[in-house]
Structure formats: C-alpha cells, structure tokens
C-alpha cells in the first residue's frame, strides 16, 4: 500500500512538474518554432503564398499568359527573395475572402497577400504586416438602374462576400446617410456579379480594386467610396520569425521607394 502511495505520489509530482514546466518548455518550443518557420520554408525551397487571381493589378490570372501577376505577386516575390535568395522560389495558391484564413490555419500556405484588410478582430487570429496599400469600399450597380449614390440605394439589396469587411462598412455608412439597405451574402465574387446581372441584388459592394475586375459595359462603379481598407500580409500566429521577415521586407520596400514604384508599375491609383 505504502509502495502504491509512493508511486502515486511520484506520478503526481511528475505531472505537476510537467504542467508547471509547460510554460518554460512551450516558451522554448515557441522560440524554436519561431526559427523553424523560416527553416521549414528553406528546407522546402519554396515560399507558399495565397493570392487573389481575380483582382486586376493586385493578383490576377492573365488569361493571355495563364500567369498570375500584379502588385501583390511582386510583393510575394520580394519576400521569397529575402528568405530564399530567389524571387522565383514562390508557389501561388488562389484564395478567396472565405478560403484565405482556413488555408493559412491548415498550413497550406505560409502567408496571404490577397487584398486582406487589417482589422483588430483578424489580428487576434493572424500576424499582419504593416499596411502596404489602402483601398476603400465601392458600389457597383447596373447602369440602367439609375442609382447614383448610397442614398439612392435606400430599400435596395446589396450583395457582399462572406468573410469580407464590406457588409459592416456599408451598413455603417448607410446609417450615416439615412439609407436602409438589405444584404445578401455570397461565397464568391462571380456569384455576386451573376446576382447583379440577374436582378436578384441591386448593388455589388466590395473594395474598389476588386470591383474593377468585374466591371463590364452594363455596369458602373459609383464615385462614392467608404471606409478605408488597409491591406497587410498575414501569416500564422506563432510563425513569428516569418512575420518579422515579411514586415522588414515591406518596410524596407516602403523606405526605398520600391512600393511606390510597384504601385506605378501596375497603374494603381
Ligand atoms: N479587403 C476586404 C476584406 O479583407 C474585402 C474582401 C476581400 O479582400 O476579398 O475583407
């Protein structure tokens, strides 16, 4: 019995040591994982990046060349160069507003450079770099609708993407101009555009840069813009060495004027 008590006692002590030791050992593994996040990319020989493929000038699959190109593609290449010494050691994966977070969580991609607005809420889940661009939320309507501004959308239905900042932004702005609007949420931008074309919704709202990818002869983007959206590069929490490297690259590029050059190169206003 004494022996058994002794064994239980030892087990308890061992458990307590393991539990209390947890803080220091996890700190150790945190710092080693902070090193290993970069090492894993180096061992793999490729930086995996989630990008948009339907946002002209930012992340866009050029139908003529089948290549993905744009400002955020060039930023990703610069980060690949910083980590791997070669801007071509980068692999792109197409993401949407809905899929980019989960793809980062699952480790399918190392980082997201995809018109991802920095918000306090998102900062709880991901590391964000300092902003590299500011866009604002726009409204696209059918030219034939005669709608000219947010006030004119009173009583109308606006299509927005799930997991996007657009609904909140327009809800707040509509209140200010005394408009009551309804929302329909969709999984992807092509679905919103199709709903606009079929008359299911009266307006398609998202960041101006994204709207441009869906502009055609029957639609127009209204002049009014709302709620500045600061774009940052997101990476997984815990991958802190990677986050630091990304941020250093962005800030170096800001200081050297490279970011401004890229904005010019892509004709972004
Ligand atoms: N930039 C906005 C956001 O992060 C719009 C959605 C999108 O980027 O697709 O929510």
Image (spheres, rainbow, N blue to C red):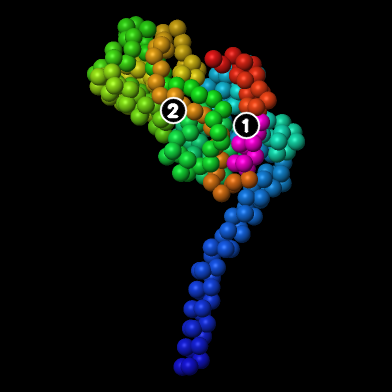
The mark that comes first in sequence, 1 or 2, is: 2
Span shown in magenta: 242-252
| Nearer to the camera, 89 or 36 | 36
User: In the displayed structure, would residue 259 be above or below residue 242?
Assistant: above
Taking 193 as reference, is 248 left or right?
right
* Picture quadrant where residue 262 is located: top right
Q: Position of residue 242 (x, y in %)?
A: 62, 43
Residue at 54% from the left image edge and 70% from the top image edge: 18
Mark number for residue 188?
A: 2
Residue 137 part of the magenta-drawn span: no
Q: Is the magenta stretch mostly helix, strand or loop?
A: helix
Mark 1 → mark 2, Cα distance in angstroms: 29 Å
Q: Residue furthest right?
A: 85
| Nearer to the camera, 140 or 186 | 140
Q: Do the residues labelled 1 and 2 touch (CB within 8 Å)?
A: no
Q: Residue furthest front?
A: 255
| Nearer to the camera, 252 or 204 | 252
Mark number for residue 220?
A: none
Q: Position of residue 229 (x, y in %)?
A: 46, 26
Residue at 37% from the left image edge and 7% from the top image edge: 143
Residue at 61% from the left image edge and 36% from the top image edge: 247
Residue at 54% from the left image edge and 15% from the top image edge: 269
User: In the displayed structure, would residue 59 be above or below residue 143?
Assistant: below
Which residue is under mark 1? 250
* Picture quadrant where residue 74 is located: top right
Whether residue 243 appears in this view of the structure is: yes
Q: Position of residue 268 (x, y in %)?
A: 56, 16
């Amino acid at each position: 019995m004494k022996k058994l008590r002794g064994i239980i006692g030892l087990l308890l002590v061992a458990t307590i040591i393991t539990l209390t030791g947890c803080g220091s050992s996890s700190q150790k593994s945190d710092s080693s994982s902070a090193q290993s996040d970069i090492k894993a990319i180096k061992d793999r020989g490729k930086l995996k990046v989630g990008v948009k493929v339907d946002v002209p000038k930012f992340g866009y699959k050029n139908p003529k060349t089948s290549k993905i190109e744009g400002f955020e593609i060039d930023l990703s290449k610069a980060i690949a160069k910083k980590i791997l010494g070669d801007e071509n050691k980068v692999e792109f994966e197409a993401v949407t507003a809905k899929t980019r977070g989960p793809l980062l969580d699952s480790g399918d991609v190392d980082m997201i450079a995809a018109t991802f607005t920095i918000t306090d809420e998102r900062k709880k889940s991901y590391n964000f770099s300092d902003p590299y661009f500011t866009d604002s939320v726009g409204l696209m309507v059918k030219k034939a609708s005669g709608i000219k501004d947010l006030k004119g959308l009173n009583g109308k239905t606006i299509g927005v993407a799930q997991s996007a900042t657009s609904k909140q932004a327009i809800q707040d702005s509509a209140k200010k101009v005394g408009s009551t609007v309804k929302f329909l949420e969709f999984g992807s931008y092509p679905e919103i555009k199709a709903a606009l074309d079929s008359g299911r919704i009266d307006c398609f709202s998202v960041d101006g840069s994204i709207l441009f990818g869906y502009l055609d002869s029957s639609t127009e983007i209204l002049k009014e813009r709302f709620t500045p959206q600061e774009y940052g590069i997101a990476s997984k929490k815990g991958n802190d060495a990677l986050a630091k490297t990304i941020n250093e690259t962005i800030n170096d590029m800001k200081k050297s004027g490279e970011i401004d050059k890229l904005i010019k190169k892509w004709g972004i206003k």
